[in-house]
Image (tube, helix red, strand yellow):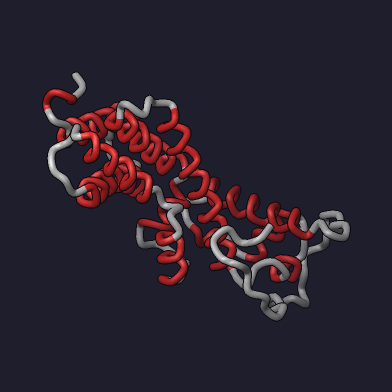
């Protein structure tokens, strides 16, 4: 499977650090033409490590190799380094974020642009809370990705912001919101959602209200704040 965001640049194979000391091979050797399957298994392993550990520091070439059941040099056949693995994992998860937002929005009639905006906002918050380490890597300043990699993810449209912007454009066009600047609305909603997600991730020991109640409060308040009175929900 090729990179989701840009054509993969062929690189010389880089030997793994201390590759002379390798993990015993537990995984069956892939058949010819099945290299993409190993790549997918590597990304699945990174996902699993992130899901069970509070920090991307837990992801290492050796840890991933042990999870997959292959040798560290086999990882380097598919990824240049740990940064590239995390980049592709985040890209894959945030592509799923877009799918989740689109599915939520598609469940609301096109004649209800405010409802579609609300559905997308709720889906974004839910996804962020369900994928805290991916969210932390991309948005919360504890990233091992380079600035260029983070910017490429953002420009590629996998962060959900373009969905907010399109929904806000539709609300402005329909005349159901105050103001005529969809970018300002979209960035305001994004900032509100990010604030909630990042606080719940970073401060889990605070006595927060239930996440569902907090989401209802934030989303309802945000949408009512934008909506003209005759279109505001009760």
The residue positioned 39% from the left and 62% from the top of the image is 142
Q: Is residue 164 above or below residue 219?
A: below
The residue positioned 67% from the left and 75% from the top of the image is 10
The residue positioned 13% from the left and 30% from the top of the image is 228
Give the camera-side residue of 132 and 26: 132
Quadrant of the drawing holding the C terminus: top left
Tally of numbered discs: 0
Q: Position of residue 69 (x, y in %)?
A: 76, 56
Give the camera-side residue of 180 and 70: 180
Taking the image as shown, residue 50 lies to the left or right of residue 30, namely left
Taking the image as shown, residue 145 lies to the left or right of residue 63, namely left
Give the camera-side residue of 90 and 22: 90
Q: Is residue 230 at least partly visible in the picture?
A: yes
Residue at the far top in the pictured view: 234
Q: Position of residue 188 (x, y in %)?
A: 22, 47
Q: Position of residue 43 (x, y in %)?
A: 63, 54
Q: Is residue 115 above or below residue 60?
A: above
Q: Is residue 228 above or below residue 46?
A: above
The residue positioned 44% from the left and 40% from the top of the image is 127
User: Can you tell which quarter of the image residue 169 is in?
Assistant: top left
Q: Is residue 156 above or below residue 163?
A: below
User: Can you tell which quarter of the image residue 120 is in?
Assistant: top left
């Amino acid at each position: 499977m090729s990179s989701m965001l840009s054509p993969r640049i062929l690189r010389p194979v880089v030997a793994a650090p201390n590759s002379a000391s390798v993990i015993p091979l537990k995984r069956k050797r892939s058949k010819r033409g099945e290299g993409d399957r190993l790549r997918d298994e590597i990304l699945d392993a990174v996902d699993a490590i992130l899901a069970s550990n509070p920090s991307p520091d837990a992801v290492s070439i050796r840890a991933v190799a042990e999870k997959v059941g292959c040798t560290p040099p086999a990882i380097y056949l598919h990824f240049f380094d740990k940064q590239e693995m995390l980049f592709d994992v985040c890209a894959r998860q945030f592509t799923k974020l877009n799918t989740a937002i689109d599915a939520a929005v598609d469940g609301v009639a096109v004649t209800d642009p405010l409802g579609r905006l609300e559905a997308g906002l709720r889906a974004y918050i839910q996804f962020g809370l369900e994928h805290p380490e991916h969210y932390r890597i991309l948005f919360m300043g504890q990233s091992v990705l380079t600035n260029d990699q983070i910017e490429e993810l953002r420009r590629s449209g996998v962060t959900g912001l373009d969905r907010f912007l399109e929904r806000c454009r539709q609300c402005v066009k329909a005349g159901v919101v105050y103001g005529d600047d969809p970018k300002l609305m979209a960035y305001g909603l994004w900032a509100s959602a990010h604030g909630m997600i990042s606080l719940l991730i970073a401060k889990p020991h605070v006595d927060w209200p239930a996440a569902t109640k907090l989401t209802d409060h934030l989303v309802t308040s945000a949408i009512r704040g934008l909506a003209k009175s005759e279109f505001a929900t009760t």
